[in-house]
Image (cartoon, helix red, strand yellow):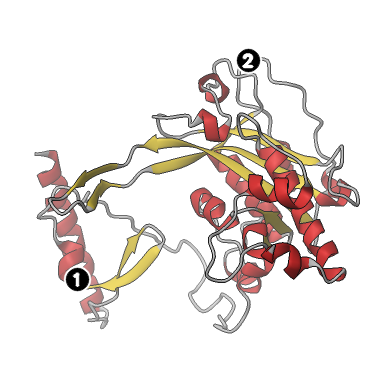
Amino acid sequence: EVFQRRSKLLKEKLETLKKRHEKEGDCSDDAWLLANGFVVTRTISEDARAFHVPFKEPCLVVFRQVHGDATDGPERNENQPLDDQRKGLDQMEIPVSIMNTPSVSTGLPPRIQFLSLSDLPSKGDILAFDAEFVSVQHERSSLTATGSKVVTQEGRNALARMSLLDCRKAGDNGNGGDDILLDAHVMPREPVVDYLTRFSGIREGDLDPRGSHRHLITMRDAYLKLRLLLDRGCIFVGHGLGQDFAAVNVFVPPHQIIDTVEIYHQDKRRYISLRFLVNYVLGRDMQCSEHDSVEDARASFELYLKALELKAEGKFDKVLTD
């Protein structure tokens, strides 16, 4: 009943908007876009307005310009780099003080050394990045008569920990001491169905604001911290960054990414895990039990430095093919 009422209301609103556009001389009805995760495609009006299936939740978001004129903004150049477009179009004016937000936990979080905001990394500075995730929705699937797997509900993960290392302080071998720029656990917006402790190192009490002993921040603060460093022109090094940034829901231009999973990848071969690369290239073992995002971030930076060293010596291709 609620679904039907919302569907009826939404159809009425859409019809009102359509009549308004027709009155203003804009009769185009083919400008609908379908956003399916990170895939955006064009769709038709009939599909956008149809609510004949219950999985389509009726939802209408209306944006209204409160000041200025549409011609006031800078002219967009499609050939202009994305980060330059950001400066004129959607720069968020994030205050640098966002880097020092306190923990939301009411427990006894460990003392953290607040950052010197005047010494924040800026354009061209390298940051080692890694994140850990928890599951907020299990995948549902079934097998057909032919044995094919049909996924009826995609599994979803949420950011649970984010670590950033300032590589300016990491030393020549990448294994520095006071190089942790940020190491915070992130409070999920949805109930956690699996903490994935074996892979994430996250335990149930870590994300509970009523008693966590971790430095716990909100998802909004985590996003703003990352976005601030991104807008400052920092370069991120890590292993499998594409998946991490997609899960955090932030786009990082390719020229600001150094991904060791790609550096050590051979064409038409499988991608190599971080643990194997550390064991083979750096000659040591890591993470005997649970993952640690600080350790992963530092290992990724060490692998990057090792790749530069091997390439300078002309040995990189041999190491990669052995």
Relative to 279, say whether 16 is above or below: below
In the image, taking residue 314 as reference, residue 43 lies left or right, namely left
Q: Nearer the viewer, residue 232 or 307?
A: 307
In the image, taking residue 231 as reference, residue 30 lies left or right, namely left
Which of the labelled discs sits on residue 159, or is there none?
none
Query: Crowdedness of circle 1 by 10 Å Cα count: few (<14), some, many (20+)?
Result: few
* Mark 2, secondary structure of its residue: loop
* Residue at (74% x, 59% y) in the render: 234
Query: Crowdedness of circle 2 by 10 Å Cα count: few (<14), some, many (20+)?
Result: some
Image location (x, y in percent) of residue 266 = 61, 68
Q: Amino acid at mark 1?
A: Ser
Image location (x, y in percent) of residue 141 = 24, 44
* Mark 1, secondary structure of its residue: helix
Specify whether residue 95 is in view.
no
Image location (x, y in percent) of residue 74 = 59, 78
Q: Which of the marked residues, 2 or 1, is nearer the chain's N terminus? A: 1
Q: Nearer the viewer, residue 12 or 269?
A: 269
In the image, taking residue 313 as reference, residue 85 lies left or right, namely left
In the image, taking residue 321 as reference, residue 16 lies left or right, namely left
Dot 1 corresponds to which residue?
45
Dot 2 corresponds to which residue?
107
Relative to 59, say whether 161 is above or below: above
Relative to 47, say whether 126 is above or below: above
